[in-house]
């Protein structure tokens, strides 16, 4: 059985790449509009000031399940590198059933 605390994503916080674990909540500060996945992320509703949460990862670490608003999407960590994020406290993410 895999350890649930395993690091599953590398996201860009400012100029420093940081690891996040399942349950991490962050606010999107900006998107890299030159990244090839940027348009797809925007189409999925991931825009600046959006609060998103890493829910889990597939058994081999990819893709990641990310909660965006009231829904969940599976994304590759390399696509998430198009985001500049700011780590938030978990209570910032409203529970949606």
Image: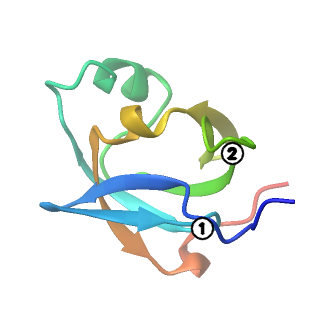
| Label located before the other in sequence (1 or 2) | 2
Can residue 51 be seen from the camera position used here?
no
Residue 12 drawn at (x, y percent): 26, 55
State the count of labels.
2
36 relative position to 73: left or right: left
Residue appearing at x 48%, y 65% in the figure: 20
As drawn, the label of residue 79 is none
Label 2, residues with CA under 10 Å away: few <14, some 14-19, many ≥20: few
Residue appearing at x 39%, y 54% in the figure: 10
Can residue 35 be seen from the camera position used here?
yes
16 above or below 34? below
Q: Which residue is mark 1?
A: 93
Residue 80 drawn at (x, y percent): 39, 40
25 relative position to 61: left or right: left
Q: Quadrant of residue 85?
A: bottom left
Residue 13 drawn at (x, y percent): 24, 62
76 above or below 10? above
Residues 69 and 73: in front is 73
Quadrant containing the C terminus is bottom right
Residue appearing at x 32%, y 19% in the figure: 39
Report the Cα–Cα distance between label 1 and label 2.
10 Å
Q: Which residue is mark 2?
A: 70
């Amino acid at each position: 059985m895999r350890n649930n605390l395993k690091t599953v994503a590398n996201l860009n916080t400012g100029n420093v790449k940081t690891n996040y674990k399942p349950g991490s909540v962050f606010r999107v500060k900006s998107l890299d509009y030159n990244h090839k996945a940027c348009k797809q992320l925007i189409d999925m509703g991931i825009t600046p000031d959006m609060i998103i949460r890493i829910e889990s990862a597939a058994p081999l670490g990819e893709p990641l399940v990310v909660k965006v608003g009231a829904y969940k999407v599976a994304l590759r960590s390399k696509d998430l590198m198009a985001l500049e994020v700011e780590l938030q406290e978990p209570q910032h993410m409203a529970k949606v059933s």
